[in-house]
Image (cartoon, grey):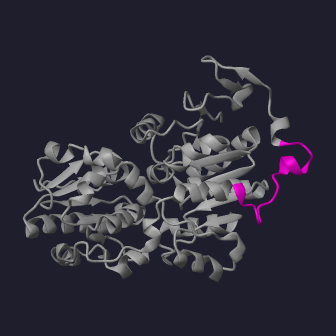
Amino acid sequence: MKILTILGTRPEIIRLSRIIPALDQLCEHVVAHTGQNFDRKLSDIFFEELGVRKPDFFFNTRVDTLATQVGQILAETEQLLERVRPDRLLVLGDTNSALSAFIAKRMGIPVYHMEAGNRCYDDRVPEEVNRRVIDHCSDVLMPYTERSRVNLVREGIEGTRILVTGNPIYEVMQHYRPQVDASGVHRQLGVQAGEYVLATFHRAENVDIPDRLRAIVEGLRRTAATLGMPVVCSVHPRTRIRLQQYYLEPTDAKLILLEPLGFFDFVALEKDAHVVITDSGTVQEECCILGVPGITIRDTTERPETVECGSNALAGVDPANLVRLAKAGASARGWWTVPREYLEERVSATVVNIVLGYNNRAPTPIWTRTGQTAESAEQPAIQGAGGKAERAGKAGGTRGENPQEIAR
């Protein structure tokens, strides 16, 4: 069986970091990176840090406009599907990269969607539209929680196509715990455990609107002054560009702006922070698991279970509200009960078993319906430069080495 996994953002790489090697061992597994958030060089760094092999294909679709980026992702996905001819497509989350599910659906390729059913019910959030489109293009849906399963059922999706897997982030954090514990980031920054605030924000609805971005920067400045401790900011490239564009780069010495941190250093800072201020869905989950109070600078969240259990508070972007919650946050540290779906230890095995073994409602790919199997449709294998098998023609590429650029 041949499985194609398409991804394009750092959270996808992190969440799939235990699933990719498992699929590599059990089937013919092809990985494609859309380049949605960063170029190939930065992509390679993320894969190397997590010890995950490099993608087989790289789309290089990092562009400024939504229409151009989505159009390129869909066009190059179609080319790749024709070349690779997978039996199934695996996507995760609500990114533009996961919109590749649309093309696969139109081509009759079974789509398996991790992180299905997340909803914030706020269409001002760009990802909310993506979530509904991807879910309704998917054949087998793998939500993390029972709440997300119910969301899907309410939208008319048959229960036999929905399988709750649990959240993969706990398994990922447990696997990389030795590397996190070995991080020297506290010493490098000169900060002590519990004596700093960690912040990260990148969402379009926050950083692309000058008034909201200005309010966030002011809220961080007031938080640092009120708590008397530095605010360490891991700054996404998109955020840094907007800070410069809108002349909002902070000059306060207590606001420490860093280049994007690696996963190990970020989690090391996260687990020892006084509080964490974020608009990231993944960080909301991590704080809940780590017992660290989280403050979400959004009006809604697709992870409402974090608010209900008490690990997370919605602040919007009002500076006074942010300061109030930051002052109150530390007193609530770790007293909540983590949702059980957040503590699943073998999510990777569950997902792999579903992708390889569950096809209750999955269609047959178009190339096998016409009487030609995926295997027979491929070109003969030839020996590549290190003795590894490569496919003749443009579909080639040694696994983990020299990912192929999709020709445009």
In the image, residue 385 above or below residue 23: above
Left or right: 207, with 28 as reference point: left
Q: Residue at x 70, y 32 (%)?
A: 395
Q: In this rendering, does residue 34 appear at all?
A: no
Asked if residue 361 lies in the magenta stretch, the reply is: yes
Magenta-colored segment: predominant secondary structure: loop
Location of the N terminus by quadrant is top right
In the image, residue 19 lies at what x, y percent?
54, 50
In the image, residue 326 lies at what x, y percent?
19, 72
Left or right: 4, with 378 as reference point: left
Left or right: 337, with 224 as reference point: right
Left or right: 319, with 357 as reference point: left
Location of the C terminus by quadrant is top right
Which stretch is magenta? 357-373
In the image, residue 192 lies at what x, y percent?
12, 54
In the image, residue 75 above or below residue 41: below
Q: Nearer the viewer, residue 276 or 28?
A: 28
Q: Residue at x 60, y 48 (%)?
A: 6
In the image, residue 127 above or below residue 257: below
**Residue furthest right in the image:** 371
In the image, residue 70 lies at what x, y percent?
59, 53
Residue 115, quarter of the rendered image: bottom right
Q: Nearer the viewer, residue 22 or 228?
A: 22
Q: Residue at x 81, y 38 (%)?
A: 375
Q: In this rendering, does residue 42 appear at all?
A: yes
Asked if residue 31 lies in the magenta stretch, the reply is: no
Q: Residue at x 37, y 48 (%)?
A: 176
